[in-house]
Amino acid sequence: MATTPHRDIGLYVHIPFCKQRCHFCAFYLEVAGPERMRSFCTALAQEILLHRQDGLVGPRALRSIYFGGGTPTALPAAQLVSLLQLIQEAWPTESSVEITVEAHPSTVRPTDLHMLADAGFNRISFGAESMDERDFTRIGRPGRVQDTGTAVLAARAAGFTNINLDLMYGLPGQSLASWTETVQSLLTLEPTHVSCYALTIEEGTTLAENIARNVVPQLDETLQIDMESAAESLLKESGFDRYEISNYAKPGFLCSHNLLYWTDGDYLGLGPSSQSYVNGIRFGTVPNLTAYTEDLNRGRLPIAERIALSDAEQQRDALVFGLRRMEGIPRHLLRPDMPQHQALVQLSRHGMIEYHDDYIRLTAQGRRYADSVAEELY
Ligand code: SF4
């Protein structure tokens, strides 16, 4: 797979704060007060400056800016706006730049949403997770189901026309019927994009502990597969196109930022625990807010590890991530000398990959075991 020297590039900003930690969540974050948030914002401003000076992005205009977390809207809207302005002063942006902010439906007020939309945020992604409040209790997610509908209406009133809603399926105690009702209820809110993530059990989380203590039942893989199929049918009936394993969009509303991950694009990550891939180099920022701020206060980038990938490794990664897209990988991009050919043939024999005239892609089975497919290709 040929690599492009100056690939499209986007920016990811990790805001490491939440009101409380949900039982299943393993993201790097803190439950912190205003002072900690202020010192984080000061450090982040310094990180933007240092990356501007190191010239990694070069003359490229940003295709996307994505504030994720954590819960970005745990920060005051005025702070998010200031950070966005700093980024826009540091780097040019494409005229069609997509600027996303993730939000918890219970942490946004109409005035905040207006401020964000007026400042240039043009996509908002709400972590709805479920439309059945019993699920919230079981996964330790704060808030009420009605907050999601209220937040979507408020976002639309503020000017957001591109609204994503995240859902999770395979939750403890969730049935196929309750999941189907969740998807149907979500669709009445008329989002432009929906992400459906299968629950996974992450080591060290409260959920993993609860399962180990038999307080919560083990995941039911067969039920998760039925839920995935039900969601796909309902979303397709409502005009959504499934374009990646977990992502569905109305025409014209594919997420530009996430597409960078799956189309061999570059991305620069800011904030503790963020990951970057720029000019063939992968690097991560320290997953520790104290170390992060200390490094930046001393004028150095808090980079934890840096790996320069060989051409072959870059091609392998482009293959692995590209296969997550429903349309797969154009066959002409698979170079004859790639060592993955044999593994691909084996995966095809096991019904995980299908070869077409012009492209290869994951089968339905392959999508369900995408992580195992990736392991075979490494
Ligand atoms: S709101 Fe999202 S980021 Fe925060 S703890 Fe819950 S799942 Fe994790």
Image: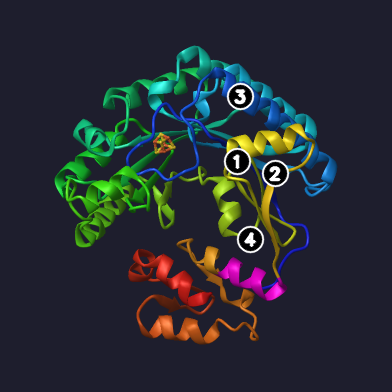
* Prevalent SS, magenta region: helix
- Write down the residue under mark 4: 264
Amino acid under label 3? Leu
Compute the Cα span from label 3 to label 1: 16 Å
Q: Which residue is depicted at the point 72% across and 29% down?
A: 45
Q: Residues within 10 Å of mark 2 (few under 14, many from 20)?
A: many
**Badge 1 or badge 2: first in the primary sequence:** 1
Location of residue 14 in the rendering, given as x and y in whole percent from the top left corner: 58, 38
**Badge 3 or badge 1: first in the primary sequence:** 3
- Between 126 and 18, the one lying in front of the other is 18
- Between 160 and 142, the one lying in front of the other is 142
Q: Are marks 3 and 1 in contact (CB under 8 Å)?
A: no
Compute the Cα span from label 1 to label 2: 8 Å
The span picked out in magenta is 310-319
Rendered position, 346 above or below 208: below
Amino acid under label 2? Pro
- Write down the residue under mark 1: 272
**Badge 4 or badge 3: first in the primary sequence:** 3
Q: How is the image coloured?
A: rainbow
Q: Within 8 Å of ligand 1, the CB of disc 4?
A: no
Q: Secondary structure at mark 3?
A: helix
Amino acid under label 4? Asp
Task: Tell me if residue 43 can be seen.
Answer: yes
Image quadrant, ligand 1? top left
Q: Are marks 1 and 2 in contact (CB under 8 Å)?
A: yes
Q: Which residue is depicted at the point 23% across and 51% down?
A: 211
Compute the Cα span from label 2 to label 3: 21 Å
Location of residue 371 in the rendering, given as x and y in whole percent from the top left corner: 42, 66
Nearer the observer: mark 2 or 3; the answer is: 2
Q: Residues within 10 Å of mark 1 (few under 14, many from 20)?
A: many
Compute the Cα span from label 1 to label 4: 23 Å
- Write down the residue under mark 3: 80
